[in-house]
Image (cartoon, grey):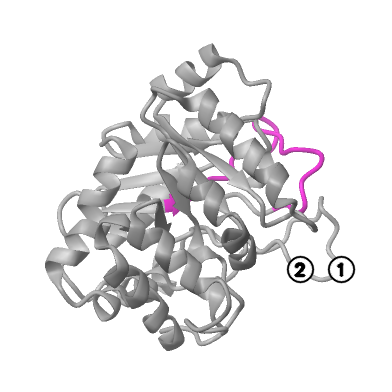
Amino acid sequence: MRSFDRARQTPVNFSVPAGACDCHTHVYLDDQAYPMDPARKYTPPPATNEELLALQKFLNFDRVVIVQPSNYGADNRATLDGVKALGQRRARAVVGIDEKTAAAQIDAYHAAGARGVRVNLALAENVDPAAVAKHLRATAEQLKERGWHIQIVAHINVIAALKDALSSLPLPVVIDHFGYPKIDGGHRQPGFDVLVDLVRSGACHVKISGAYRCSTQAPDFPNMKLMAQALIQANPDRVVWGTDWPHPDGHVQGAKPTDVTPNLVVDDGALLNQLPVWAPDAAVRHKILVANPARLYDF
């Protein structure tokens, strides 16, 4: 199955503002030219630059952020190839680095369209908040004076445990997917109030993306409305939106890491159509879709 199939998408039912940005996507390219990390947890099917561009045009988006997935480790060639294919007038990247990544390499990533580094804590079985805080400070030191940000994917309890560390970092912090709350846990679940406070204070941005990873109530995910609105009302200048295309599924029971596992079937048009439900004010949607991403990703 193709990673983007127009026939499976619901048309967008509201006016998407010029300059709108899909702030969370991935590409998975030819595995011969772009081999995945041998230590990866799962293997998704191809998701090409051409399919990504077709999705963006279908959604009426002018800009897109391609995020380095865990499958490639710190090899950012596929992600940056996506930016090159779509062009830097349209695309930016969030890359992966480690403590050995040299300053000159980070500068080369910047020239290729990167504006942030992703730290993936969601795949770890155990997370030591003190060790993570130390790692985040070291990463911030690597990125200083470049105008970059740190993007974090971690479950809500980990976000809560890192509150002080996240608040003290000297550069912007972006939290993926509503802070990865407990599925169907709702806005009153432990830890979500901490995320709201981090957004309210301006210490963190949050992506109201991946609703289907936080709720079983497809296709409209009505139980995500209160969570989205709590974050938007806390600070509309710190909220961005993304599809999370092509919706990889790293939790197929019995699959080996090298087995190609199908993507989750998600209607991106229907997903986008929830944004006016969550944010009825067009001016607020303009912040979420245009102004905030433009500032964060240097468009």
Could you tell me the amino acid type at mark 1?
A: Gly
* Residue drawn 29% across the image and 35% down it: 298
Q: Is residue 40 magenta?
A: yes
Please give the residue where the numbered disc 2 appears in the rendered image: 252
Q: Dot 1, how many residues are within 10 Å of its Cα: few (below 14), some (14-19), or many (20+)? A: few
Per the rendering, the mark at residue 254 is: 1
Instruction: For the residues labelled 2 and 1, say whether their Cβ atoms are less than 8 Å apart.
Output: yes
Magenta stretch in the rendered image: 24-43
- The residue under the point 71% across, 38% down is 36
Task: Indicate whether residue 119 is drawn in magenta.
Answer: no
Local secondary structure at mark 1: loop
Give residue 173's position: percent from left, percent from top: 45, 46
Residue 265, image x and y in percent? 55, 72
Dot 2: element: loop
Residue 117 in picture, x, y percent from top left: 52, 37
Overall secondary structure of the magenta section: loop
Image position, residue 119 (x, y; %)? 60, 44
- Quadrant of image for the C terminus: top left
Residue 44 lies, with reference to residue 178, above or below; the image says above
* Whether residue 233 can be seen here: yes
> On the picture, is 160 further left or further right than 36?
left
Residue 241 seen in the current view: no
From the viewer's perspective, tell me whether residue 134 is left or right of residue 231: right
Total number of numbered labels?
Answer: 2
Asked if residue 68 is positioned above or below residue 155 in the image, the reply reads above
Q: Nearer the viewer, residue 275 or 53?
A: 275
